[in-house]
Amino acid sequence: MTALRLGRPLLLLALTLLLLAAGEVLLPGFIGPGQIANQLKIASFLGLFGLCQTVVMAAGGQGLDLSVGAIATLGGILGAALMNGSNAMTPIGAGVAIGAGLAAGCVNGVGIAVLGVPPLVTTLALSSVIDGGLIVGVSLAHPANGASPGLVAMTGRSFHGIPTVAVLWAVIAAIAIWLLSRSAWGRRLCRTGANPITARLSGTDTTRVRIVAYMMSGGIAAFGGFLLTGYVGQAFLGLGNAYVLTSIVVAAIGGVALAGGRAPYGGVACAAILMTVLVSLLTAINIGESGRQVIFGLTLLSFLMLDRYLMRARR
């Protein structure tokens, strides 16, 4: 099992290096310091949203969070409205954004774990409520949508050549890996996803575990949207929508079990980097949107088939 857990990240990193080498051959300068730093920034955001899916998928019940895009947009718009261009209000804006994400995630968790509504239905419904009501209401009440200079500087700054956002993501990733694979709560999460009946018989409150999982997803998504506001300079409708499907793809490629019970975030982080480099290369060589979608689909299908093969090999 340990070899398999280590093998997925190593495979993804090896494929990333191959893509970087191919990019440098086709487009000299593709692996220049500036280009690498920009790809790390983009991968950091994708990795954060991939963490949202990792947690809820690990909780089982065919869990997927289709509301991460809407929650990210809500977090960005709330944060921007409270910051209103003021550095002093930036921590408050971040706190309120995360609080709103936790509340939205709690609604998802209660609907799924307590009321028994399927995750796809619950999260899609909440996404519609947020997009169609809350975000519009906040935008009308507080039209300011610009990030503070401090947040813009932080998301654009580098630390010894490494983007600050990537450093922050690395810290969050280290905490997430420990939480999901080493902590008692992480073990309860994976037991809940693998076999909720057995988990309940062993004393795990599976309802609470799943609610907390969706709350974590909401809080992380809102924080990601808040950081995105600094990265692009302002909040706007649809800010986080591009990350809904891509976050699911990197979670699946990273080795998270669609049926639940497995949360290898190290692999998901490597998948976020791989997919960012792949998108960058395809864009640089002028592959059209239809061609990119075909390649993404084939990539996802290949890794799902690999998972199926590994499952049969372990039996």
Image (cartoon, helix red, strand yellow):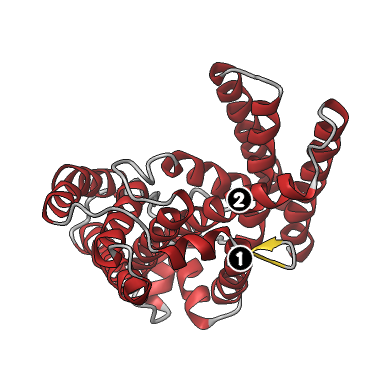
Q: Residue at x 32, y 49 (%)?
A: 67
Give the residue type at disc 2. Ala
Tell me if 286 is positioned left or right of 224 in this view: right
Query: Which residue lies under the disc numbered 2?
Result: 43
The residue carrying pointer 1 sits among few (fewer than 14), some (14 to 19) or many (20 or more) residues within 10 Å by Cα, namely many
Q: Earlier in the sequence, mark 2 or mark 1?
A: 2
Element assignment for label 2: helix
Q: Is residue 108 above or below residue 207?
A: above
Seen from the viewer's position, the closer of residues 106 and 25 is 25
Image location (x, y in percent) of residue 66: 35, 45
Mark 2, mark 1: which one is toward the viewer? 1
Seen from the viewer's position, the closer of residues 132 and 315 is 132
> Where, by quadrant of the figure, is residue 113 drawn?
bottom left
Q: Residue at x 49, y 45 (%)?
A: 248
Tell me if 144 is positioned left or right of 297 in this view: left
Image location (x, y in percent) of residue 38: 65, 48
Tell me if 182 is positioned left or right of 261 in this view: right
Query: Which residue lies under the disc numbered 1?
Result: 164
Tell me if 169 is positioned left or right of 96 in this view: right
Element assignment for label 1: helix
Asked if disc 2 and disc 1 are in contact, CB closer than 8 Å, the reply is no
Residue 66 in view (yes/no): yes
Q: Is residue 285 above or below residue 23?
A: above
